[in-house]
Amino acid sequence: MRGKLRMFRTVLVAGISVPVLLLAAASPGLAADDGRGGRKPEPPSYVYGGAWPTSHVQGVTVDRRRGFVYWSFTQQLVKTDLGGKVLGTVVGLTGHLGDIDVDERDGRVYGSLEYKSAESFYIAVLDGRAIDRVGMDAERDGVMTAVHLDEVAEDFTADMDGNGVFDGDTADTLDHRYGCSGIDGVSFGPAFGKRGGRQTLKVAYGVYSHTGRTDNDHQVILEYEVGAWDRYARPLSQDAPHHSGPEHPDGKFFVRTGNTTYGVQNLQYDPYTRNWIMAVYKGRKEGFPNYSFFTVDGSVAPVRGEIEGQPAPETGSLLTLREAGLRDEATGIRGWEFHGSYGFDALGDGRYYVAEGRAVEQDGVPAQEGEIRLHRWTGGTPGPFTPVG
């Protein structure tokens, strides 16, 4: 723990005062940019995001222009500076807040948000500039709106076995088109096959782990142009979820990796390699390499082709895995072995933050802590990164 500062803050959670451990790296000289094009702060090699009475860290995104780090802890969002100082939190979420990404143009944070029992799936849009204190309420403090994704709900609730009954939130069924369990990975980036141009939001499906079906061996990624989303965005009442959102995505894409456990946990466009990174929980299906890390070749345009394994022949826009890393001879699938599923953020210069988390206990209260460590791209195998510092 050398070079770090231990601090405790008491926050009110469900009416109970809970001591929260805040452990900040001692990093002088990391003042945020003023937002008018000033020099970006140099990223530290390590940032601690605190320990919180929630589920484990699900995603992380760094706003280098403004000097902030945002952390998704499933039921709440945490905002720190680059030294690990907690600047604010958004609490009160009863759904599953997953991967997050910041739109650097305006500082808003976009994250996947699921309410499976209500068959409702959203992109939460949080105003990063307005998050200025601990304990801000997601519903009442005007800091969050949500946009419903009809396409996800339709695939999640699809009655694939034709028995007239939707089997609900379970992997042990043939329901759920493509094995869709909802959404998780999100990232801004250019159109697939493009090196620049308009940035669109990509949203990756969660996919149930089911080794007895053949139609769940692709990762599914939706594309949305969010420039006109203000017409859909609404404050979210979690007791009565709205369904305001685009009826269809602007694009729907498939990449064959083999079945994974809950699909793409973290999705990230990497301006340095110009590829799309997908971190997953490893699959269990025989006949596939079951890698934990994949990259989509960002220079190859989608091609129209067969979506293999579907109950009826189906075609779609297929993405191409990068010709690098490990290669499975039986399937031709390429990938790596790396731990990016708790959070991953590309800084655009060959450096990346990788999140880690673990369960801890504070004065008898279970909590989850999160941290990010700086890595550098090597392209090697089995893992393509090496820690920095």
Image (tube, rainbow, N blue to C red):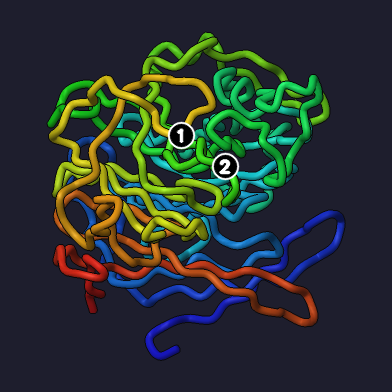
Coordinates of residue 386 in the picture (x, y in percent)? 22, 73
Dots 2, 1 in contact, CB < 8 A = yes
Marks counted in the figure total 2
Residue 224 point in image, percent of width and height: 40, 21
Residue shown at 16% from the left, 55% from the top:
324
| Residue drawn at the location 17% of the way across and 63% of the way down | 377
Residue at the (47%, 81%) spot, across then down:
5
Q: Which residue is mark 2?
A: 213
Q: Nearer the viewer, residue 241 or 263?
A: 263
The C terminus: image quadrant: bottom left
Secondary structure state at the residue bearing disc 2:
loop
Mark 1 neighbour density, 10 Å: few (under 14) some (14–19) many (20 or more): some
Asked whether 213 or 219 is in front, the reply is 213
As shown in the figure, which amino acid type bears the numbered disc 1? Gly
In the rendered image, residue 195, in percent from the top left (x then y), is placed at 13, 31
> What number is the disc on residue 309?
1
